[in-house]
Image (cartoon, rainbow, N blue to C red):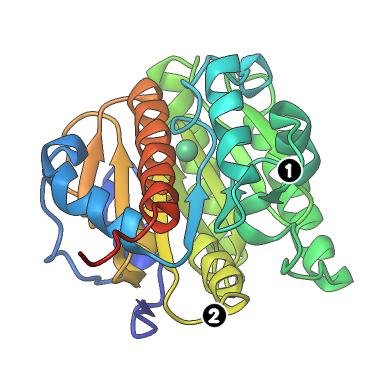
Amino acid sequence: MVLNVRYSGSSAVVDELYPTSPVRPAAGPRDGRRVPPHLFDAWPAVGARIRLAERVVLLLDFDGTLTPIRDHPAQVTLDPLTRSQLEQLAKRREVKVSIITGRRQSDVQQRVGLPGIDYVGVHGWEGRDGYRSMDSTLRLMGQARRFLEPSIFGLPGIWIEDKGPALAIHYRKAEPASVQWARIAVRALTRVFEPGLRVVSGKKTWEIFPRFFPGKSGAVRAILARHPPGVLPVYVGDDTVDEPVFHALQGGITVRVGRKARTYAQYRLASPDEVRGFLERIDQERERRLATASSPTPLPV
Ligand SMILES: [Mg+2]
C-alpha cells in the first residue's frame, strides 16, 4: 500500500466543480478520472483481496456513505442494520474501522455510538491523530465567520455551521438566487483572506478551511502510519472531499457512492444500502478466511 504524496489534494476537487465552485480553480490534474465499474461486478477479485489480506483497515465516510443525506445534517440517523454490521466488523481483531467525516467528532460518535471504532471529525482535524487547533487558526476562522455572517444574513435556506477550525456554508434548501448571493459572499471572503483560506465544494455545501490543512487525505495518511506495512486499506466516500483520498490511496480499494460519475475511485456503489451490502461481504470474506485457517489439514494416506 502506498500513498501518493505527489498529490497535494485540493485543486482537482475545486476544478471538478467549477463553475459552481466559488473559487476559480488552480490548474489541476483532470486525467485519471473515469466512471468506474460497479464493485459487486468485480467481486471475485475484490473479495479475494479482502479475504487474503493479513489485516483490513476500513476507512468510511459518514453522510451519503453510511447514511442517506437529509435536508439538514441533524436529521441524519444510522440505520440499525448498518450499525450492527459495523459492530460485527469492529469486533474482528484483524479489521480496524475508522469513520472519517466532516462532522464534529462528538457528533458522529454519538450518532454511531459503537466502541472499537476510531472517529475522526472535521475532515481529520478531530481524532486520535488530529490537528491541534492553534489559537491562530481559531482566530482566523472566527474572523472569516464574522466577515461572512452579515453578507448571508437573511438569505433563506443558507446557514453557516461553525466547526471551530472549519466553516461549512449549507445551501441545500435555498433558492438559486440565494445561492448566487452566498456564492458571491464566499468568493469575496476568499479574496479578502487570500491566501489564508481554501474552499472545497461538497454536496450543497462549501467547506472553508485554513489553506494549509490537508483534509481527509492527511487523516488517512496518519491512520495508515499506525499500522504495519501490508495492511489493505479500503476507503468508501461519496463526495468531492473524498476525491483526494481516492487519488492518493494507491494499492488500496477505493469506492465512490452515488450516481455514475467520473472519479478517481476504482469502484462505485449506488447507495448507502449497497454500502451495507459491501460491509456484509467484507465480514463474510473474513469469516471464510478464519474457517480456512482453522480447518484441519488432511492427513497423508
Ligand atoms: Mg459524505
Q: Cα distance, mark 1 to mark 2? A: 28 Å
Q: Would you say residue 22 is visible in this rendering?
A: no
Quarter occupied by residue 49: bottom left
Residue nearest the viewer, comparing 47 with 202: 47
Q: Please tell me the numbered disc located at residue 187.
A: none
Q: Which residue is drawn at 60% across and 21% down?
A: 78
Q: What's under tag 2, amino acid-wise?
A: Pro
Q: Residue at x 52, y 32 (%)?
A: 63
Residue 115 position in % (x across, y down) = 77, 41
Residue 58 position in % (x across, y down) = 49, 52
Residue at mark 1: 104
Q: In this view, does 163 lie above or below 280?
A: below
Q: How crowded is mark 1: few (under 14 residues within 10 Å), some or many (20 or more)?
A: many
Residue, far bottom:
6
Residue, far front:
301
Q: Is residue 299 left or right of residue 142?
A: left
